[in-house]
């Protein structure tokens, strides 16, 4: 009975869009009727209209480019080091403990709290922002990789040993691939952290990027541009997350999702 | 969902290695500072950090604003924003989780809302409400709301259909159904949302306090940068870390106490 009901709706894609449509209509009505001052609370149409004038497409693409460059740079450094450190920590027990101790010690400090000291160390340029974004990616990817290493099915390792794999080859051929699902989780969490941190870093100290764009618009009192920017930040995050999901989950992890039926 | 096996056999030798590593790092830092290889403008020595922590606790930074005042401001903001999110998120989540149509309609909106980096709303809220407590509290609420909401929805959707049928067979009315069946069955997931939301609130508030405030943990480290007092910055970071750790330990205790059967559940993937 319940399944029948779901079948009836699964094809109705419009239902998924209803939420957005309702919000847009209510938003437009509220601002059109001047229930709230429309200069403070502009409607969707005026947001789109004036934002395109105030922020030319070329300028917008430049801001997006700067932000994306920072996220990608920081994220890749964080992901690579996070995976490597996680694998080493999980595989070699002694070295693992030595690595884990300082990482566990600084992990409770939110990456955002590193902004002041990053500026002390690296100045106001690109490197301090990338450092913060790196931290945002590193910790979730490291901890998830480590978790994956701890939870490897011992039968897999035994099978590997029986088939004659030892040491580094057992690590690379069996243990490392077995942690892929956990690494994938870490990568998705890390990406969303990195993304948020990019915006935060750009709000606090930058002269380009999407975070700067909305902070600057606030100084100029262009509320339409702020709303426009917030929506673009949301869409960009959604789109990149979708891309990552498609790449990782659909391609690399098909075996995992087929076998475990998640 | 794969179940996590908490097989952390923390034995003595492991702990000795870990503590030893930290001690060695501290000693090396101290030595490097003493020898002059580590510039005091880049990294204060451990003893300087200790002195700075004492200063932040007793004298306060800026003068007069002790760590207790910073902590009080931050905690107060977190509590207000968090409660607001919980009061909206849990009932809304229960409602959406029960209705197939509402769930279909709201899923894309919630997904989008979660993708909007909370901190990116700061300029908008400042424009609407000024640099006030309201902006800060609402920002925390926004960050927490979606985590609490999605976990509550998931909690309701995952309820074993047999519980609901049993309730119906036993003749539960709507109110009984809600309070005696739905809420308790969804509670473990709701708690996960509430736990994760505390972390979110903490991250958001530190970021928010770095812009346009002088009181609060985030303000402490940001102000110290303006005064070029790197020892205070590091001291502040350590205090923030300790507070964050304290929060998560407390929450873990509470959860283990209230929901001992559901402790191994993980947060819902977004």
Image: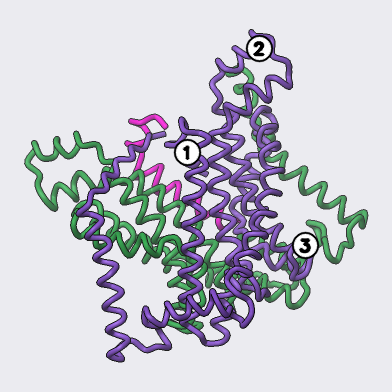
Residue A2 visible, this orientation? yes
Q: Is residue A103 left or right of residue B176?
A: left
Q: Residues within 10 Å of mark 1 (few under 14, many from 20)?
A: some
Q: Colour of chain A?
A: green
Q: Chain of mark 2?
A: B
Seen from this angle, which residue lies furthest bottom?
Answer: B36
Q: Residues within 10 Å of mark 3 (few under 14, many from 20)?
A: some
Provide the secondary structure element on which disc 2 rests. Answer: helix
Earlier residue among tags 2 and 1? 2
x and y percent of residue B60 in the render?
A: 58, 78
Q: Chain of mark 1?
A: B
- Coloration mode: by chain
Q: From what the image shows, is residue B202 above or below residue B110?
A: below
Which lettered chain is shown in purple? B
* Residue at mark 2 to residue at mark 1: CA–CA distance: 31 Å
Q: Which quadrant does the N terminus of chain A fall into?
A: top right
Residue at 76%, 46% (x, y): give it.
A23
Task: Please give the residue where the numbered disc 3 appears in the rendered image.
Answer: A47
Range of magenta residues = A234-262
As for residue A251 lying within the magenta part, the answer is: yes
Identify which residue is drawn at 72% across, 41% down.
A19
Which mark is drawn over residue B256? 1
In the rendered image, residue A241, in percent from the top left (x then y), is placed at 50, 52
Q: Residue furthest left?
A: A164
Tell me how far mark 1 sits from mark 3, CA to CA: 48 Å
Give the number of the disc on residue B168: 2
Per the picture, the main secondary structure of the magenta-coloured stretch is: helix
Is the C-beta separation of discs 1 and 3 under 8 Å?
A: no
Residue B177 among magenta residues:
no
Residue B147's x, y, as percent? 59, 46
Q: Nearer the viewer, residue A142 or A180?
A: A142
């Amino acid at each position: 009975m319940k399944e029948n009901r779901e079948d009836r709706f699964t094809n109705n894609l419009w239902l998924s869009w209803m939420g957005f449509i309702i919000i847009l209509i209510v938003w437009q009505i509220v601002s059109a009727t001047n229930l709230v001052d429309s200069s403070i609370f502009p409607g969707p149409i005026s947001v789109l209209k004036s934002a395109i004038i105030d922020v030319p497409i070329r300028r917008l693409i430049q801001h997006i480019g700067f932000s994306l460059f920072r996220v990608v740079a920081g994220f890749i450094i964080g992901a690579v080091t996070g995976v490597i450190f996680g694998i080493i920590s999980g595989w070699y027990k002694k070295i693992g403990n030595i690595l884990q101790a300082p990482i566990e010690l600084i992990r409770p400090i939110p990456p955002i709290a590193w902004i002041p000291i990053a500026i002390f160390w690296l100045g106001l340029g690109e490197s301090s922002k990338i450092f913060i974004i790196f931290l945002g990616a590193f910790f979730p990817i490291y901890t998830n990789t480590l978790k994956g290493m701890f939870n490897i099915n011992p039968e897999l390792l035994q099978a590997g040993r029986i088939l004659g794999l030892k040491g580094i080859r057992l690590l690379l051929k069996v243990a490392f691939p077995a942690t892929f699902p956990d690494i994938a989780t870490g990568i998705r969490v890390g990406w969303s952290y990195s993304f948020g941190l990019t915006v935060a870093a750009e709000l606090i100290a930058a002269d380009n990027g999407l975070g700067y764009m909305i902070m600057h618009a606030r100084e100029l009192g262009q509320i339409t541009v702020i709303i426009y920017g917030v929506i673009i930040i949301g869409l960009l995050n959604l789109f990149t997350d979708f891309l990552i999901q498609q790449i990782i989950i659909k391609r690399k992890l098909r075996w995992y999702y087929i076998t475990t039926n998640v | 969902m794969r179940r996590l096996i908490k097989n952390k056999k923390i034995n003595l030798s492991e702990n000795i290695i870990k503590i030893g590593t930290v001690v060695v790092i501290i000693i090396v830092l101290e030595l490097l500072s003493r020898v002059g290889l580590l510039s005091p403008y880049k990294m204060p020595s451990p003893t300087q950090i200790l002195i700075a922590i004492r200063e932040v606790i007793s004298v306060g930074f800026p003068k007069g604003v002790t760590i207790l005042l910073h902590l009080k401001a931050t905690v107060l903001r977190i509590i207000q924003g968090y409660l607001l999110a919980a009061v909206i998120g849990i009932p809304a989540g229960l409602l959406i989780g029960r209705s197939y149509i509402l769930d279909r309609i709201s899923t894309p909106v919630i997904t989008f809302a979660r993708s909007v980096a909370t901190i990116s709303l700061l300029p908008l809220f400042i424009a609407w409400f000024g640099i006030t407590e309201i902006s800060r509290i609402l920002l925390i609420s926004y960050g927490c709301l979606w985590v609490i909401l999605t976990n509550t929805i998931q909690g309701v959707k995952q309820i074993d259909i047999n519980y609901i049928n049993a309730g119906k067979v036993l003749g539960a009315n709507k109110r009984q159904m809600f309070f005696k069946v739905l809420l308790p069955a969804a509670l473990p997931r709701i708690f996960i949302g509430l736990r994760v939301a505390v972390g979110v609130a903490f991250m958001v508030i530190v970021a928010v306090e770095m812009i346009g405030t002088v009181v609060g943990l985030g303000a402490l480290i940001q102000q110290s940068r303006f005064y070029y007092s790197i020892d205070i910055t590091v001291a502040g970071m350590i205090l923030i870390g300790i507070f964050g750790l304290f929060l998560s330990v407390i929450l873990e205790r509470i959860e283990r106490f209230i929901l001992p059967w559901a402790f191994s559940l993980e947060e819902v993937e977004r």
